[in-house]
Image (tube, grey):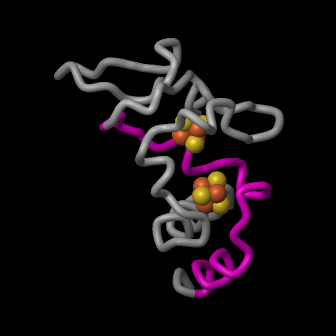
Amino acid sequence: MGANIEDVLKTEASCSNCQACCCRLEVMILTDTGVPDVHISLDEWGGETMLRLDDGWCSALDRDTFMCTIYENRPLICREFEMGSYECSNERALHVLASC
Ligand code: SF4
Ligand code: SF4
């Protein structure tokens, strides 16, 4: 059952129809890509992560278009999270299951 959901999601993977579910994940800022301070949160160890708002999404996400508003300055982790990858399919599967 889970494998079938994952297969379907993988073939249909598109950032425009998944409500940016990966932008709800914790995103550590490991390198300086120029993320604006207003979108940065300091964790208890002093590490920098992308700020997430009460609705769960990263504060840099446009809630209407589900597009990243700091695309040119997005963190390294966001650059490496490829649409259609295993991680992407996994998040989409979890998102679908959570919506059922
Ligand atoms: S990378 Fe994958 S999980 Fe993230 S917004 Fe795009 S399709 Fe959705
Ligand atoms: S920086 Fe952009 S791509 Fe990365 S989690 Fe936030 S909205 Fe998504």
> In the orientation shown, which residue stands out farthest toward the right?
64
Ligand 1 sits in which quadrant? Answer: bottom right
Q: Is residue 17 visible?
A: yes
Picture coordinates of residue 48, whole percent (x, y): 32, 25
The residue lying toward the viewer, choosing from 9 and 15, is 15
Mark count: 0
Q: Is residue 73 above or below residue 4?
A: above
The image quadrant where one finds the C terminus is: bottom right
Q: Residue at x 60, y 72 (%)?
A: 84
Picture coordinates of residue 78, whole percent (x, y): 49, 47
Q: Residue at x 24, y 25 (%)?
A: 47
| Left-right relation of 44 to 68 | left
Q: Is residue 30 above or below residue 84?
A: above
The residue lying toward the viewer, choosing from 30 and 23, is 30
Q: Is residue 27 magenta?
A: yes
- Asked which quadrant contains residue 33, the reply is top left
The residue lying toward the viewer, choosing from 65 and 95, is 65
| Left-right relation of 18 to 10 | right
> In the orientation shown, which residue stands out farthest toward the left?
45
- Asked which quadrant contains residue 16, the reply is bottom right
Picture coordinates of residue 85, whole percent (x, y): 52, 71
Q: Residue at x 54, y 63 (%)?
A: 82
- Asked which quadrant contains residue 92, the reply is bottom right
The image quadrant where one finds the N terminus is: bottom right
Q: Which range is magenta?
A: 4-30
Q: Residue at x 81, y 39 (%)?
A: 65
